[in-house]
Image (cartoon, rainbow, N blue to C red):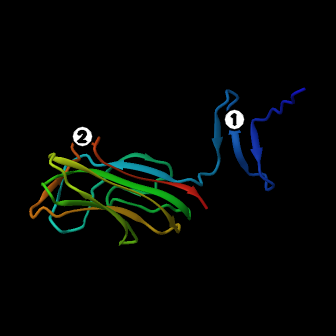
Amino acid sequence: MASIIKANQLQDFGGNSIITSDGAGNLTTQKTNYPAFSAKMNANQTIPTLTWTKANFNTEILDTNGKYDTSNYRFTPGVAGYYRVSAHGYLQANDGNFGRVAIYKNGSEYNFSVNSYGFSNYQTQQIQVVMYLDSDDYVEAFFRQSSGSDKTLLGENGTENNFAAYRIGS
């Protein structure tokens, strides 16, 4: 015989609500311990040759805790833990040259990927890392290319670029 427990609220030992239900099966957690954001660019950006350039991801798609800043293009989580951080963009290509995308932590390069350009006009540059962030650390996305002249990082329709992070645990 199966048992059924019915409740509209789950509390911790301190009497604080952890989970509530609206009676229709929809749950709400009371504490947001898993900050997440996703942002895109709404305009093209020039990337000079041989210069790491911060990408202007200025339009939020998602920001659960209000921790992504669209004016300085950085995410400060507010909650310490391990995060999956990713960035990708569509960078104008030039035969035989390299495009790169990097995640910066607190203003310094944390990790980067190197992608060789093919013969098409634009190439996707992407990176995904898992990293530990303290509550006051911040991350940013930077791009670089080695063509010998300025190139364009597409942003006009926002579908070719994204900068995102979400907490995966303590």
Q: Residue at x 36, y 49 (%)?
A: 39
Q: In the structure shown, which secondary structural element does the residue marked by tag 1 occupy?
A: strand
Which of the marked residues, 2 or 1, is nearer the chain's N terminus? Answer: 1
Q: Nearer the viewer, residue 167 or 9?
A: 167
Q: Amino acid at mark 1?
A: Ser
Dot 1, how many residues are within 10 Å of its Cα: few (below 14), some (14-19), or many (20+)? some
Q: Is residue 17 left or right of residue 92?
A: right
Amino acid at the residue labelled 2: Asn
Q: Picture coordinates of residue 58 (x, y %)?
A: 30, 52
**Residue under numbered circle 2:** 157
Q: Quadrant of the N terminus?
A: top right
Which residue is at 46% across, 53% downward? 66
- Could you say which is closer to the camera, residue 40 or residue 94? 94
Viewport quadrant of the C terminus:
bottom right
Q: Is residue 116 left or right of residue 9?
A: left
**Dot 2, how many residues are within 10 Å of its Cα: few (below 14), some (14-19), or many (20+)?**
few
Q: Residue furthest left?
A: 149
Q: Which mark is residue 21?
A: 1
Left or right of residue 148: residue 55: right
Q: Measured along the vertical axis of the image, is residue 149 above or below residue 20?
A: below
Q: Is residue 43 above or below residue 56?
A: above
Q: CA distance from mark 2 to mark 1?
A: 38 Å
Q: Identify the residue shown where x is 12% and y is 61%.
A: 147
Residue 92 % position (x, y): 17, 51
Spot occupied by residue 72 in the image (x, y as percentages of width and height): 32, 62
Residue 48, labelled with which disc? none
